[in-house]
Amino acid sequence: MVLPPYAEWLGCSIEWVGDVPELVLPFGEHVMGWPDLLQGGAIAGLLEVAGIAALTHRLSQEGGGRIKPVTVTTDYLRTGRDQHPTRAVGTILRLGQRTAHIEATAWQEDRDRPIATARLNYRVLRG
């Protein structure tokens, strides 16, 4: 799977959990906001990449297609800290012929205690 260039700049990698792409963001100075804290833009970028990964993977199973972002809304729930890598996964809520709606969640130690969530809407160009 090819991720956007921003994912490479962030240092994201993919770990497959079954058939689900899970993004992993290691902590580093390039994603640090305040000392020892994860910068909010890096979190939002990780969530967007997780949504793109989920949608791209599903579209590849359905004959391919291209996507264009429409809206991305991020909710920050907790502070991201430097002790652990940050993980994120996208969940497709609806994939129609022309649009896709995705929810992405980011966490550090405990998936049940997310640090941020996002709602992403994409225009889908099939074929």
Image: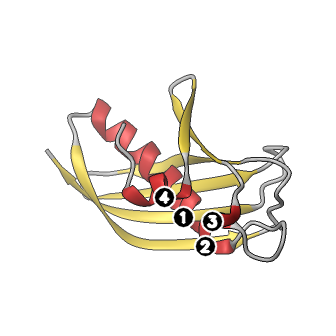
Q: Alpha carbon of mark 2 to alpha carbon of mark 4: how far?
A: 13 Å
Please state the horizontal and vertical placement of residue 12, each as a whole percent of the image. 55, 48
Q: Going 72% across and 68% down the picture, which residue do you hit? A: 32
**Residue occupied by mark 2:** 41
Q: Amino acid at mark 2?
A: Gly
Q: Can you say whether 115 is above or below 26 in the image?
A: below
Q: Going 22% across and 40% down the picture, which residue do you hit? A: 64
Q: Amino acid at mark 1?
A: Gly
Q: Which mark is residue 9?
A: 4
Q: Which mark is residue 45?
A: 1
Q: Going 29% across and 35% down the picture, which residue do you hit? A: 60
Of 88 and 127, nearer the camera is 88
Q: Going 57% across and 58% down the picture, which residue do you hit? A: 46
Toward which corner of the image does residue 22 lie, by quadrant? top right
Q: Earlier in the sequence, mark 1 or mark 3?
A: 3
Q: Nearer the viewer, mark 4 or mark 1?
A: 4
